[in-house]
Image (spheres, rainbow, N blue to C red):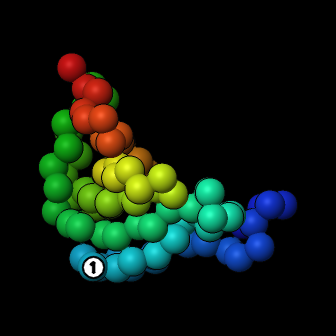
Amino acid sequence: MFGKDTKTPGVLMPGNPKVGDKFKSEDVSQDIHEEDEVLSLSETVTVPAGTYKNCLKLREKLADGEIEHKYFARGIGCVREVPAEGDVLP
């Protein structure tokens, strides 16, 4: 991502992600940045909108040190986020 406050372009998602890939999707300042790592390419995720197979699981380390996990379905985008405080799905 690249914007008016961002000096260095970031990578939202590698074009052909592989397990172990590391990148920064946001790198604005010391207080606003994320360190991302691809953990899996084969997750099955069920959410109220449906079940998605072969999802990418991403670990995001935020500037404050908290860890979040995000799941991306091919052709859809982010289908689930699990914040540091834990899962919010019923």
Dot 1 amino acid type: Gly
For residue 80, above or below residue 75 = above
Residue positioned 68% across, 74% down in the render: 9
- From the viewer's perspective, tell me whether residue 1 is left or right of residue 39: right
Tag 1 residue: 20
Image quadrant assignment for residue 82: top left
Residue positioned 38% across, 50% down in the render: 66
Tally of numbered tags: 1
Image quadrant assignment for residue 30: bottom right
* Residue lying farthest to the top in this orientation: 90
- Give how far across and how far down residue 47 sits, in percent: 25, 32
- Give how far across and how far down residue 56 sits, in percent: 28, 61
Question: Quarter of the image containing the C terminus?
Answer: top left
Question: Quarter of the image containing the N terminus?
Answer: bottom right
- Give how far across and how far down residue 13 sits, in percent: 47, 68
- 28 or 19: which is nearer to us? 28
For residue 48, above or below residue 19 = above
Q: Residues within 10 Å of mark 1 (few under 14, many from 20)?
A: few
Q: Is any atom of residue 70 visible in this view?
A: no
Q: Is any atom of residue 10 visible in this view?
A: yes
- Give how far across and how far down residue 41 sits, in percent: 22, 66
Residue positioned 46% across, 75% down in the render: 23
- From the viewer's perspective, tell me whether residue 90 is left or right of residue 84: left
The secondary element bearing badge 1 is classed as loop
Residue positioned 41% across, 67% down in the render: 36
* Residue lying farthest to the right in this orientation: 4
- From the viewer's perspective, tell me whether residue 11 is left or right of residue 56: right
